[in-house]
Structures are given as C-alpha cells and as structure tokens.
Image (cartoon, rainbow, N blue to C red):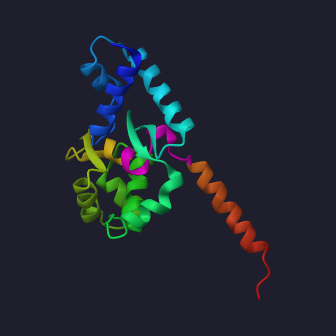
Amino acid sequence: MPENNLKSVIEALLFASDKPLALEQIKGVLDNLDTVEIRRLLEELKAEYGQSGRGIRLVEIAGGFRLVTAPDFLSFLKKLFKQRHIEKLSLPALETLAIIAYKQPVTRLEIESIRNVNADGMMKGLLEKDLVRVVGRKKAPGRPKVYGTSRQFLEYFGLRSLEELPKVEEFLKGRQEAHEVREATPAD
C-alpha cells in the first residue's frame, strides 16, 4: 500500500477513535508495519497538520495519539458548544487528585492525613469519573487499597505521562515568590 494511503488509514483510525490510540493498537490494524514506521508516519501527519493551518492537530497524549482541535480556534468552539456542560472538578477534588498524582500509590488513610478531612466521598467521586483507580493493596494490617491515577486522568489533563506533571518545587518557588511580592507591596 502506498505511504499516502497508510497515512490516510491512520488518520481514519484516529478520527474514528474516541480515545487516544496506542502504537500497538494501530499496529494491530496495520500488521505489516512495525511501531517505528507507524511512529514515523504519525510524526509526518503531525507536521502536516501543524504546517497547513488546519483546524485539527495530532497530539501524543496518555500513551497514545489523538486528533484534537487547534487551540487557535478555541473562541469559535466556545460559541458552538456554549450550552455543552463540561463537568469541572471542585477544589477539594483537585486537592485529593493532586495528592494521589504526586504520592501514588497512596491509601485513603494517607490522603486523609494529608488533607485532614474524610476522603470517602471524594474518592468515590474520583473513582466514578475514572480519574483514579485501585492499583493494589498495601501490605499492612487490614490490607488497605492503594490508589493511583488512571489513563483517563492523563487524558483529562492533557498529559502524555505522569512525568509531565509540574514539579512540586515549581509550586513552592511560585508560592515563595508570591509571598515576597505581597511582603514588598506597601499596604494602602
């Protein structure tokens, strides 16, 4: 099959998929190609989308590849989907999720000791949204469940992997800088 046709097949697979496609999934369809060749074709498609000024882009996210809309057209998309309800996470949910993301694997008790509040309801909600998952059990009395983030977490936050999470030191530095600015600003 000519290379342009292979790119068209990959493009169709990406368009039809509601989740990021892993290289292995694409290879399962195009069994005559190895993952190195598939990645090369994906990178070519990615470059073509970026250079042509089209309304879509190809991004690598959550261990796979996905077609997304170009950020330049966000204002138009907002108008189109004005009534569309996008569920946002509450501040307590984000705090709980951050603890899990940075401390995983972590038990509910460890989360509660950090947040200093009961986490049962929050954990239930995050599990229902598939942002966290049970990754095992701790070798401790009662064998409590340990939690980690899910692939859906990566998709939700647009991350390729957990390595793309901002470093804790960056937060601490920003917090210190904000404190210094407040200290240096004279009160009215």
Q: In the picture provided, is 164 more to the left or to the right than 174?
A: left
**Residue 143 rendering spot, x and y as whole percentages:** 21, 44
Question: Count of labels shown?
Answer: 0
Residue 73 can be seen in this image:
yes
- Residue most toward the bottom? 188
- Residue most toward the top? 32
Residue 162 is a magenta residue: yes
Q: Residue at x 69, y 68 (%)?
A: 179
Q: Residue at x 43, y 64 (%)?
A: 78
Q: Residue at x 38, y 38 (%)?
A: 66
Asked if 1 appears above or below 117 in the picture, the reply is above
Q: Residue at x 44, y 37 (%)?
A: 58
Asked if 165 appears above or below 33 in the picture, the reply is below
Q: Quadrant of the C terminus?
A: bottom right
Which stretch is magenta? 154-167
**Residue 118 rendering spot, x and y as whole percentages:** 30, 66
Asked if 158 appears above or below 176 in the picture, the reply is above
**Residue 69 rendering spot, x and y as whole percentages:** 43, 48
Please name whichever residue, 44 or 64, is drawn nearer the observer in this view of the structure: 44
Please name whichever residue, 21 or 73, is drawn nearer the observer in this view of the structure: 73
